[in-house]
Structures are given as structure tokens and as C-alpha cells.
Amino acid sequence: MPHLLMSNDQPETAVAPTDSSPTDYSPADSDPTVLPFRRLGHTRLRGLRLRPFRGANPDLEPLRRQAASIIDEVLAGTNPEEADVREKLQWHVANNPGQPEKALLEHLRTVADQQESA
């Protein structure tokens, strides 16, 4: 049976599983497959969540916001011919968490190196 996550804050809003579980199931039961979690303040996911690093230079914040905006715009593209570019950019973003300016710089360097070798 798959695990069912339910909020500690609002157990009445938990969705009952759609498989063959009993119909008299209640989220308050002590079923070991129910994993409680605390509900976050928001449910909307964002592309990038910038968290300042300890000792980070506050002068970098405008650059980080600008780089994050550029990355978001590129990743929002839907052109199938640019899918490989989006995939590579996502890789750089994943390998530079919280540093979109570094991710964008490394991505641009990779693209430039590929163009030089071609």
C-alpha cells in the first residue's frame, strides 16, 4: 500500500487513497502507512528559491535576481529545438544551488566552449 501523506494542521483535507483501501478509513486512525507532515505557508512552487549564504556579499543580490530572471525565462521556453539547452541549464542550476549567477556563467562558458570547438 502506498504511503499517504496528510497535514497535521488540516487532517480533514487529506485525500483518501484511490486503491482498494477500506471505505471506513479515517486519517485519525493509527495506520503505520500514514506519514504526517507540517503544512508549509504556501503551496506554489517556484523555479528558484534564492537563499543567501552565510557571509554572502549583499552586493551580489541584484546580480542574483537578474541571473535568476534570465534562467527562469530560458527554462520557461517551449521550443523543442532548445530542449537540450534548457536541460544543460537545469543541470548547472542544480549543481550551483542558491547561486544562479554562477550557474548562468558556467552555462554560458560551456556554450562558448562548444561553439569554439565546432
Image (spheres, rainbow, N blue to C red):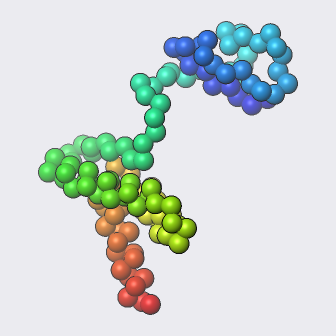
* Picture residue at 72% right of the left edge, 10% below the top: 26
Residue 96: tell me if it is visible. no
Instruction: Tell which residue pokes out farthest to the front in this image.
Output: 79
**Percent position of residue 83, x then y:** 53, 67
**Percent position of residue 62, x then y:** 19, 51
**Percent position of residue 3, x then y:** 70, 28
Q: Is residue 49 left or right of residue 13?
A: left
Q: Is residue 52 left or right of residue 57?
A: right
Q: Is residue 36 left or right of residue 58?
A: right
Q: Place residue 36 in its image quadrant.
A: top right
Instruction: Give the number of marks.
Output: 0
Instruction: Tell which residue pokes out farthest to the bottom in this image.
Output: 118
Q: Is residue 61 left or right of residue 92?
A: left
* Picture residue at 51% right of the left edge, 66% below the top: 79
**Percent position of residue 31, x then y:** 73, 16
Q: Quadrant of the C terminus?
A: bottom left
Which of 4/24 is in front? 24
Which of 48/55 is in front? 48
Q: Quadrant of the N terminus?
A: top right
Residue 22: tell me if it is visible. yes
Q: Is residue 43 above or below residue 25?
A: below
Q: Is residue 25 above or below residue 49?
A: above
* Picture residue at 45% right of the left edge, 56% below the top: 76
Which of 16/54 is in front? 16
Instruction: Tell which residue pokes out farthest to the left in this image.
Output: 59
* Picture residue at 32% right of the left edge, 53% below the top: 68
Q: Place residue 4 in its image quadrant.
A: top right
Q: Place residue 94 in its image quadrant.
A: bottom left
